Image (spheres, grey):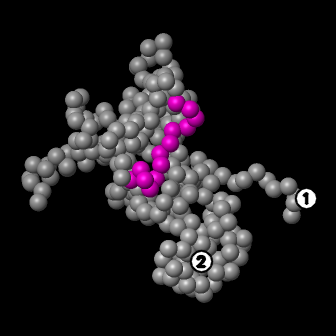
Amino acid sequence: MLSVRTVFVLAAVAVLATATWAGVWPVVCCYDEKTPLEVVDSNGPTVFRDIMVGTRLTIIIRSDEAVQFGGGLIMSQEDSAFGELQPRGTGDKWWNYPDSCRYEAGSDAQAWFVVDPFSVGVDFVNTFHGGDRRFRDAVPGDWFIVDYHALQTGSCEIGFYDYSLFPPDTPSDLFVPLETLLFHHVPTRDLNADRVVNLKDFAVFASQWGASPQTDSNGLDAATDLDTNHRVDLDDLRLFSDFWLERTDAPLPAADPNQE
Ligand SMILES: [Ca+2]
Ligand SMILES: [Ca+2]
C-alpha cells in the first residue's frame, strides 16, 4: 500500500511534470516523420493504437522553448526483445549519432546509444550556453529523431526522461519518466512482405480460407490465422481488414511499368 509520503512524492513529481510539459516532449510519427501515430489513451502511459510487427516509426523530441535539455528515451532489456530504438546513421567513437541531432538542437547536440544490464535506449543533450558566442544555442523546434522498429508480437514500453528534473547524484533507478509510451505489436497483415497491406495480401489470405493451422505451423495458414484459434475464418478477415492499405515502412521504389 502507498504511504502518505509516497503519495506526496508522486504528487510533487506529477506537478513538476505538468509544469515542464510544455517545454520538451516526444512525438511519435509513422515512418514518414509527419503523420502522428494515433493515441488511444493519453492518460499515462500514453497508449498508441496497435501496430503490425515489422512497422517502423519515428520518435521526435520536440521543444517549444529555448532551454537547456538533457534527457532520454529508455526501455527495459526485457522490452528490447519486442521493440528496437535506433539512433540514425553511424555512431562515432563516443557512441554519438550526429544524424539523430537536428539543427535546432544547437551546434554540439549529442545523441548517444546507451545500454546497461537493465535498460537500453538513447540519451540526448542539446547545446545551450545562454548566448556564449562559441556555440550556437538550441532554439524551439525538432531537436532529435530516432527510429523505432516493432520486432515481434507483444508490448514495448518506452520512458521519456528529462534528467534535469532530478537532483544531481540521483541514482538512475529512481528516475521517473516524464511520459511513458506504450506500443502494442500485432501479427503482420503484410503477407507478401512488400511493406503495404493490399489486394495482393488479400489474395494470400483468401487462399488460406477455411484452413486449420497447427500450433507448430510456420506457414501461410498460421500467418492468416490472426487470432490463433486454429481456424482461418471471418474473425481473421476482420482483423486483417483493420490494417487495410496500411504501410509498415517507406514505399519501395516505383516499379518498372514494363514489368506489370
Ligand atoms: Ca503486402
Ligand atoms: Ca482464426
Name the residue type under label 2. Asp
Mark 2 residue element: helix
Q: Find out whether residue 196 is within the magenta segment.
A: no
Tell me where residue 67 sits by quadrant: top left
Is the CB atom of the residue marked by disc 2 within 8 angstroms of ligand 2's nearest atom? no
Kindly identify the residue that appears in the image at 41 percent across and 56 percent down.
156
Q: Real-space Cα distance between discs 1 and 2?
A: 33 Å
> Is 170 situated left or right of 189 in this image?
left
Residue 151 visible to the viewer: yes
Please identify the residue farthest to the front as the structure is shown. 216
**Which quadrant does the N terminus fall into?**
bottom left
| x, y percent for residue 63 | 45, 38
Read off the magenta span.
79-91
Q: Earlier in the sequence, mark 1 or mark 2?
A: 2
Q: Indicate the position of residue 186 as horizontal and vertical percent values.
A: 49, 66
Q: Which mark is residue 221?
A: 2
In this rendering, position of residue 134 left or right of residue 243: left
Q: Can you name the residue that lies furthest to the right here?
A: 258
The image quarter in which residue 206 lies: bottom right
The amino acid type of the residue labelled 1 equals Asn
Please name the residue that numbered disc 1 is placed on. Answer: 258
